[in-house]
Image: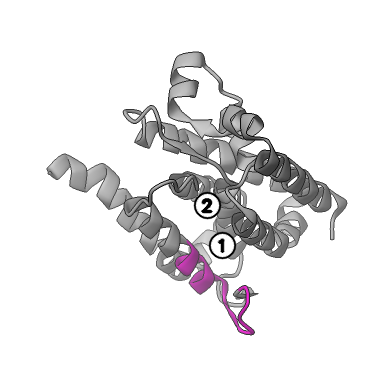
Amino acid sequence: MNIVLIILIAITCVISYIGFQNVEVFQKYKFEVGAIQRRKEYIRLLSAGFLHGDWLHLILNMYVLYMFGPLVMQVFGVAGFLIIYLGSILLGNLFCLYHYRNVPFYSAIGASGGISGLIFAAVILDPVNIKLGILFLPIAIPGYIFGALYFGYSVYMMLNPRMNDNIGHAAHLGGAFFGLVYGVIIFPEFAVQNAFYIGIMALPLIYLAFEIFIKKRIG
């Protein structure tokens, strides 16, 4: 595995563990609408991507990062990988800031925005032949189906929030959008070639966009 990916996973695990143990650190660096709007603590837009709610949340995100990271690095290079990952975290949290701009107490954490960006950037290359295993299950499924299930879950959780759920589900959409756009810009030929499968994978995101930008205005 590339040393950059190992370092990134290690840093995320260490910071998340510190957040588990130290409530003050967790509260200071998590994504929080009010703190960003009123106190201009913009560092939270990035630092929240290195904090997680619990061990399961951390393990799931690091598992997907471990699965997609090497492929993205191989195709886009180390610099491209970092641009996609960090850029997706930032754009994902900016989308959260927009979506929850009237909810100052809303907070979230997690690398999901960056992970979403990597998924879209990777699967856009070959959504059928890139096969991924589902954690705890001995099966492998095409990348576009994996992506559809991943985003379907994220959309469901965002539209049906649970009490004390700090996971940044809204960040998935912003992160996915960044990864998709970056992939299309760098490899437009793959986007055209795999448009059908990318469309299937993006269905949950299209539905989410309808709920947020169209349905609310109509209602």
Q: Is residue 182 visible?
A: no
As displayed, is residue 193 above or below residue 44? below
Q: Is residue 137 magenta?
A: yes
As displayed, is residue 201 above or below residue 8? below
Mark number for residue 180? Answer: 2
Q: Is residue 206 left or right of residue 1?
A: left
| First in sequence: mark 1 vs mark 2 | 1
Q: Residue furthest bottom?
A: 138
Q: Nearer the viewer, residue 65 or 79?
A: 65
Residue position marked by numbered label 1 in the rendering: 124
Q: Residue at x 87, y 51 (%)?
A: 3
User: Badges 1 and 2: C-beta atoms under 8 Å apart?
Assistant: yes
Q: Residue furthest right?
A: 3
Q: Nearer the viewer, residue 126 or 13?
A: 13
State the SS at label 2.
Answer: helix
Which residues fall within the magenta stretch? Answer: 135-150
